[in-house]
């Protein structure tokens, strides 16, 4: 959950910077997701902090995480030859609309169930 929340904040920032005309919509959807899944997100963050305290991540693992985040950004923002105009902006909007509408929860019910017990 920590990784999803961290990635969402970073991607929201990049989407808003790249496509400022949808920045407010993205922030609204991000806030909706954070509000709707608050318990799971807070428990996921607490679990992450406990794991970090017990076994800090290596610099290599952190670099790998950043590389994965960069790959996610490229997948969202890239304009392929066969993509419709503005595909990156549409993918940014969809990424956060899906979070706000519960798509992540629906696709990973076991994670949410475990965090909300």
Image (tube, helix red, strand yellow):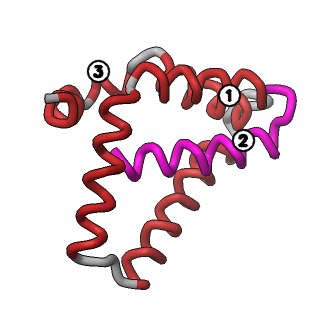
**Residue at image point 62% right, 32% down:** 91
In this rendered view, identify the residue nearer to me: 19 or 25.
25
**Residue at image point 46% right, 15% down:** 101
Mark 1, secondary structure of its residue = helix
Q: Residue 15 carries which label?
A: 2
| Residue at image mark 3 | 106
Q: Where is residue 115 in the image (x, y as percent from the top left)?
A: 21, 36
Quadrant where the N terminus lies?
top left
Dot 3, how many residues are within 10 Å of its Cα: few (below 14), some (14-19), or many (20+)?
few
Mark 3, secondary structure of its residue = helix
Q: Which quarter of the figure has residue 26?
A: top right
Disc nearer the start of the sequence (2/1) = 2
| Residue at image mark 1 | 26
User: Is residue 114 left or right of 65 when viewed as pictured?
Assistant: left
**Could you give the CA–CA distance between mark 2 and mark 3, rounded to whole angstroms?**
24 Å
**Residue at image point 43% right, 73% down:** 64
Residue 54: in magenta span: no
Disc nearer the start of the sequence (1/3) = 1
Q: What stretch is highlighted in magenta?
A: 1-22
Q: Which quarter of the figure has residue 60?
A: bottom left
**Could you give the CA–CA distance between mark 2 and mark 1, rounded to whole angstroms?**
8 Å
Mark 2–mark 3 contact, CB under 8 Å? Answer: no
Q: Residue furthest bottom?
A: 59
Label count reads: 3
User: Is residue 17 left or right of 107 when viewed as pictured?
Assistant: right
Q: In this view, does 33 lie above or below 83?
A: above
Dominant secondary structure of the residues highlighted in magenta in the image: helix
């Amino acid at each position: 959950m920590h990784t999803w929340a961290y990635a969402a904040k970073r991607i929201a920032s990049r989407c808003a910077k790249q496509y400022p005309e949808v920045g407010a919509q993205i922030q609204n959807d991000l806030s909706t997701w954070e509000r709707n899944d608050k318990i799971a997100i807070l428990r996921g963050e607490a679990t992450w902090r406990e794991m970090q305290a017990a076994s800090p991540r290596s610099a290599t693992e952190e670099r790998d995480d950043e590389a994965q985040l960069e790959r996610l950004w490229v997948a969202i923002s890239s304009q392929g030859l066969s993509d419709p105009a503005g595909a990156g902006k549409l993918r940014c909007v969809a990424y956060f609309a899906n979070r706000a509408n519960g798509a992540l929860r629906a696709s990973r019910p076991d994670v949410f169930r475990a965090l909300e017990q």
